[in-house]
Amino acid sequence: MSVQAPHLFPDDFLWGAATAAYQIEGDHLKYGKTLSVVEKNMNKNYADPSIASGHYQYWEKDIALMKELGLKAYRFSISWPRILPNGRGKINQEGLDFYRNLINKLKEYEIEPIVTIYHFDLPQCLQEEYGGWSSRKVIDDFEAYCRVLFTYFDDVNYWLTINEQSNMFQLPYLMEFNPDIPLEKQKYEMNHIMTLAHAKAIHLCRTQLPNAKIGPALGIIPNYPASSKPEDILAARHADELRTYLFMDLYMKGEYRPFVWNYLVENGIEPTIEPEDMACIKSAKPDFIGINYYQSRVVKYIPEDADKKELKLNYDGKDDDTQYDNIPGLFEGMTNPFTQKTRWDWEIDPIGFRYILNELYDRYQIPLMITENGLGTLDELTEDKQVHDQERIDFLRDHIRQLQLAIKDGAEVWGYMPWSFIDLLSTSSGFRKRYGFVYIDRDDKNMKTLERIKKDSFVWYQKVIASNGSRL
Ligand code: BG6
C-alpha cells in the first residue's frame, strides 16, 4: 500500500512573526509601568528601553503593517510590570487597556494572538523584595499574574508560559544572582522554581481557559560531535542532556533525567525538591512546545583537568571573538568549519533546524510551534528609503525549506513565527543588530524619526504567506 505523506504546509498553518514587550514597546517607566530586571541590566551603551521601537505609541501602525504583510498570527509578550507594577496586587488599568486594544485589533484583522506570559521581564521590585526567581515566593506571584491575564484576556487561544528558561544558564543579563551563593547551585534552584511556576500556569489555564492551548518556548541549540571519536559523540549527547533534554523532560515527563540528576548530585548543585513538586510538574503536560531556533553548535570532549571556560559572546558584531564555554570532563563548544556564521558568530544551519525538529518530535510526540527563527544583522537604509536585506531572505528561505522537509518527515508543526516583526532592541547587542521585516528609523544613539519602513524581506514574506509557503 502506498501512503501519500503530507508535506506541504497545512491550510491552517500559522504564518506569523514575533516580538517581546521590553524589546519594542518603549515607555518602560510610563503609564503605570515599573522597571523589570532585564531592562535594568541592559547594556548602557545600547539604546535604552524608554523608546525601544516606539511600539507603545505606534502599535496601531504596526498592526496595520501586520495586516498588510498577511500575518495569520502574531507572537508578542505581555510585560508583567506593566500589568502589576508592584509585582502583585493592584492592577494597572492602563496596562490592561493597552494589551486589550492590541488583542482586539489583531482579532479584527484575523491575526491570531500568541501571547508569551514571561519574556525575561521579572518586576525589579520582586527581585529586590525576595531575590526573584531564587525564592519560591515568586511561584505564587507568577500564578497570580497568570490569573489576571487569563481573566482579562480570556479570548486568547495560544499561550506561552516562559520564554527560553534554558537561557538563564547562559546569558548573565537576563537574571540576577546572589553573589554569596555558588552560581551553578543557584541556577539549578531557579530552574526548578521556574519549572514549578510554568506548571502552575498550565494548571491554572486548564481551569480558567480549558479550550486554550499552552506550552513553553524553549531556545534550542542542537549539539553536534566535533568528530566520530566516541568521546566526542558522547560529549554531544551530554551537552544535549544538560542544555536541552533537562528542560524538555521536565516539561514533558515531569522528571529529571538520570544523567542530569547524577551530574547535579555529584557536583552538589541539585535543587531542593519538596514533596509535591514533581507531581505538580508531571501533571502539567503542555499542549505544544515553542521552539526558538537560531543556530547549532559543535562540541568536543575535554578532560576533567582542563581549565574552566565561560561563554563570551561577540556582542559588537565586529570581531570573530566568541569564546565557547565548557564543562571539564564533559564537553567544550567550538566553531563549526562547515557552516557560515552571522556577523555575531552565530552558526547558520538550516539543516540543523530539520534535524532538531525531527529529534524533538520523535522523542516527545507533541506538536511544535516555531516561536523564533531569524537573522540578526546590520541593515542599511538607502537614500531612497529602502532596505535590501537579501541576506535575511536567504536565511529565512533556507530555514522554511527545511521546516517543510521536517513536516514531510512527520513532525507536526503548527506555525512559524520568525524573529522579528519589526526591528527591536536586541537583548545582547542593542539596535545595531536588526532582525525585523520592518525597519525602524533609529539607532542606538539617535532616536531619529522612528518611521516604519518595509524591507525587501517584508515583500518576500508577504508572498510566502499568500502562497502558503509554496513560493519561496
Ligand atoms: C532569543 C530571545 O533568545 O533570541 C529574544 O527570546 C532575542 O528576546 C533573540 O532577541 C535574539 O537574540 P539577541 O541577543 O540577538 O537579541
Image: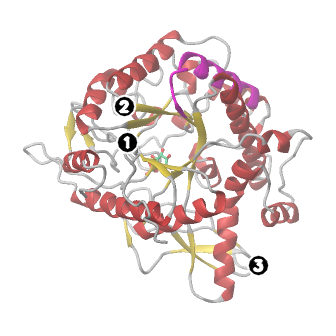
Tell me the kind of residue under disc 3.
Glu
Q: Earlier in the sequence, mark 2 or mark 3?
A: 2
In which quadrant will I find the C terminus? bottom left
Mark 2 surroundings within 10 Å by alpha-carbon count, few (fewer than 14), some (14 through 19), many (20 or more): many
Give the Cα separation between the discs numbered 2 and 1: 9 Å
**Mark in the foreground, 3 or 1:** 1
**Which region shows up in magenta?**
139-158
Taking depth in this image into account, of 244 and 33 the one nearest to the observer is: 244
Which quadrant would residue 137 be assigned to in this image?
A: top right
Which quadrant would residue 420 be assigned to in this image?
A: top left
Q: Which residue is mark 2?
A: 111
Query: Is residue 360 covered in magenta?
Result: no
Which mark, by number, is residue 165? none
| Dominant secondary structure of the residues highlighted in magenta in the image | helix
Relative placement, left or right, of 314 versus 250 is left
Q: Is residue 224 above or below residue 377?
A: below
Q: Which residue is mark 3?
A: 304
Mark 3 surroundings within 10 Å by alpha-carbon count, few (fewer than 14), some (14 through 19), many (20 or more): few
Taking depth in this image into account, of 252 and 116 the one nearest to the observer is: 252
Q: Are marks 2 and 1 in contact (CB under 8 Å)?
A: yes
Give the Cα separation between the discs numbered 2 and 3: 52 Å
Which quadrant would residue 131 be assigned to in this image?
A: top right
Is the residue indicated by label 1 positioned so its CB lies within 8 Å of ligand 1?
no
Relative placement, left or right, of 216 versus 438 is right
Tell me the kind of residue under disc 2.
Ile
Q: Earlier in the sequence, mark 2 or mark 1?
A: 1
Q: Which residue is mark 1?
A: 16
Residue 133 visible? The answer is: yes
Q: Residue furthest front?
A: 1
Q: Earlier in the sequence, mark 3 or mark 1?
A: 1
Q: Is residue 108 above or below residue 415?
A: above
What kind of element bears circle 3?
A: loop
